Image: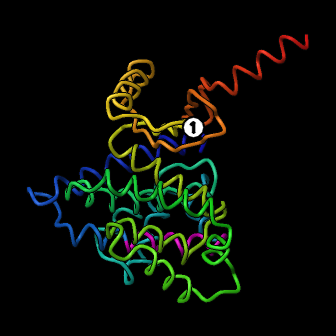
Amino acid sequence: MQGESRASLAKAKDDLDTLIGHISHGGMHKADVAELADQLFAVQHVLDREISLRRAFTDPSSNPAARAGLARRLFGGQIGETAADVVANLVSASWAAPRDIVDAVEQLAVQALYSVALAEGKLDDVEDELFRFGRIVDREPALLLALTDPAASPERKLELVNRLLDGKATDTTKRLVRELVASPRGQTFGVNLAEYVRLAAERRDRLVARVSVAVPLTEAQTARLAEALAAQLGRQVHLNVELDPELVGGMTVRIGDTVFDGSILRRLADARRRLAG
């Protein structure tokens, strides 16, 4: 997202947190927040399909109040009052591109679900489960095809998700994976799943570091690495650690597009380049 879209999304996220409040302590009830998430996903599906509608909702030449009124007329009878208010506020904001509002509605839906998981003390579990499921899908091309094959019925794919995750994952994790399977996004399944992991970390204002190691880290080593990265980056960092024997030794750490490579493999490659030169 470009500048004005990022600013609009940041404000919408702050407004949603204020709206939800502290669940079970004066704020919305968990069931109501979960229903809000479902309704926002439903709006996102409509906007994803209807290019002309998302253009109308983000037209900078139109009146923001008129856009909000249009949203209420279109969705008011299909979603609750709270969701209608959230959508009306979104369409009255400024967006750099029509597609950005689709992504914004989705992120708010995910944020609502994460608020429930956070209140239940399960957000760490959700983050780890989504990451592990992504790694399984990465390693199993047949599974990825089964989950994303456009020729397969949505019911069949959702049944597969249920078999894979029932009894092994939180309700929030299952809800999000089902969402990605039932309503494919423009990006690949793995990219979208990784985005949900990132949003989970963001919910606690933490960065996600993908750490590849040659041998497993102890709890103490993991804690020291997280502390060192937090001190360097100025933000808390959640580590997703995976084994990669090809590294030989050491580790690589990827945070977004930045890679910190401390592997023996990399040092050997550097040495070979110096010798060749």
Asked whether 48 falls inside the magenta stretch, the response is: yes
Q: Left or right? Give the position of 218 relative to 184.
A: left
79 and 181: which is toward the camera = 181
Residue at the right extreme of this rendering: 277
**Count of picture labels:** 1
Q: Please say if 253 is above or below 126.
A: above
244 and 21: which is toward the camera = 244
The N terminus: image quadrant? top right
Disc 1 residue crowd, few under 14, some 14–19, many 20+, Cα 10 Å: few
Magenta region, main secondary structure: helix
Residue at the left extreme of this rendering: 25
Residue 59 percent coordinates (x, y): 61, 57
Asked whether 242 falls inside the magenta stretch, the response is: no
The residue beneath circle 1 is 256
Image quadrant in which you'd find residue 80: bottom left
5 and 45: which is toward the camera = 45
The magenta segment is 38-51
Residue 211 percent coordinates (x, y): 52, 37
Identify which residue is drawn at 61% across, 47% down: 96
Image quadrant in which you'd find residue 231: top left
Identify which residue is drawn at 35% across, 46% down: 203
144 and 277: which is toward the camera = 277
Say what secondary structure mark 1 lies in.
Answer: loop
Q: Please say if 26 is above or below 225.
A: below
Q: Please say if 206 is above or below 133.
A: above
What is the basis of the colouring in this image? Answer: rainbow
Identify which residue is drawn at 59% across, 65% down: 54
Give amino acid for label 1.
Gly
Residue 193 percent coordinates (x, y): 53, 58
The C terminus: image quadrant? top right
Q: Left or right? Give the position of 47 relative to 227.
A: right
Residue 55 percent coordinates (x, y): 63, 63
